[in-house]
Amino acid sequence: MTQKARFMQYRIRSSNDTPPANLPAGESWERNTLRDVLLEAYKEQRRARFWRNLWRALWVLVFLAVAANSLSSSQSGPGSSLVNISEDHTAVVSLTGTIGDEYEDKTAMLRESLEAAYKNHKVKGIIIRANSPGGSPVVSNTAFNEIRRLKNEYKNRNIPLYVVAEDVCASGCYYIAAAADKIYADPSSIVGSIGVIGGGFDLTGLMHNIGVKRRLKTAGSNKGMGDPFSPETPEQTRIWEEMLADIHSEFIKAVKQGRGSRLKEKEHPDIFSGRIYTGNEAKKAGLIDDYGSIYSVARDVVNAPKIIDYTPEDSFGKLFGRRLRAEISSGLQAARSKIW
């Protein structure tokens, strides 16, 4: 309510008041109204100051909580609170989502979680709970090599490392899974997709139809390779095919290194064609070893039915930082679009 409206309200309310006997009616009304308006304005300023200071205090508390949580997370790695468990158990590490997500380092998560599990002498087996459609071949290869390194580093512990595929373990996820001692899946799981994909759009026809010409300046005949507004030359097509074939060969080499003679290439010549398999088909092709869930594998294979999750939970600081990075990235993209 504005001061003018409040003034009119007091004027209406005060018009019926009976002035004191010792003051003229006009003087009493003006003094009372002015006093009430000034008092109300003062109260409103105090309320505004109170809420402003309250919000400032809340933001300071949020900042301190984020800083303290981030500090505690950096000082205590995954599984640090689990090292003193006195009961035999199976350690589970969840591998979910896209491999190579810019907001989450899957390799670091796997390495730190597996190290925590290997260091706990009550761990009788480790299961990577996989549910991912794949992603970056670089991150997948790095994670594959880190898992094999850790297995070799702690080989004296004789702790088996298994992968259990849930809904899907394809492409980069299967790349990582190949590093395990054995792979289990549900008969209806989606497994495989040992291939590499790359693509884009050719908009040169659209540019021609609307009468727009591309002015792209490069130093190097292939510097603009992949530009959707420029035609692709036969040389560039060959380069793309060679690059994809090279990455594919690394993928195949890792799978053969991990699975060995269990792969049935003769009976399934399309095993490296990039196709996907159900769990039933994958078992026949040697892509998985048997059927199972984390519960059946922990109970019947590891013989340690108690399951402890070693996957690090996202702290409030990480979630806040992830959200902040997303907002900054969105803002930069919006600004870039306005500039261009």
Image: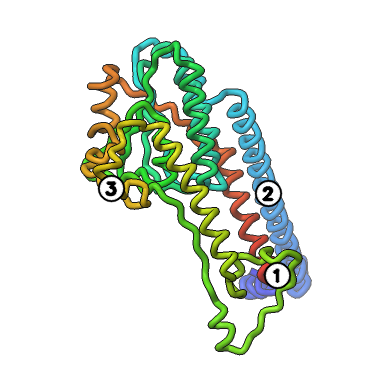
**Which residue is rendered at x = 36% and y = 32% of the image?**
259
Q: Amino acid at mark 1?
A: Gln
The residues tagged by marks 3 and 2 sit, at their Cα atoms, a distance apart of 63 Å
Q: Nearer the viewer, mark 1 or mark 2?
A: 2
Examine the rendering and report whether any part of residue 16 can be seen: no
Q: Amino acid at mark 2?
A: Phe
**Which residue is rendered at x = 29% and y = 30% of the image?**
294
Residues at circles 1 and 3 in contact by the CB criterion of under 8 Å: no
Crowding near the residue tagged with mark 1, few <14, some 14–19, many ≥20 C-alpha atoms within 10 Å: few
x and y, in percent, of residue 18 in the image: 65, 70
x and y, in percent, of residue 45 in the image: 72, 56
Q: Say whether residue 239 is left or right of residue 96.
A: right
User: Which is more toward the observer, 339 or 53?
Assistant: 339
User: Which is more toward the observer, 96 or 227?
Assistant: 227
Q: How many marks?
A: 3
Residues at circles 3 and 2 in contact by the CB criterion of under 8 Å: no
x and y, in percent, of residue 217 in the image: 74, 72
Whichever of labels 3 and 2 marks the residue nearer the N terminus, that label is 2
User: Which is more toward the observer, 153 or 94?
Assistant: 153
Location of mark 1 (residue): 3
Crowding near the residue tagged with mark 2, few <14, some 14–19, many ≥20 C-alpha atoms within 10 Å: few
Whichever of labels 1 and 2 marks the residue nearer the N terminus, that label is 1
Residues at circles 1 and 2 in contact by the CB criterion of under 8 Å: no
Crowding near the residue tagged with mark 3, few <14, some 14–19, many ≥20 C-alpha atoms within 10 Å: many
Q: Which labelled disc corresponds to residue 277?
A: 3
Badge 1 marks a residue whose secondary structure is helix
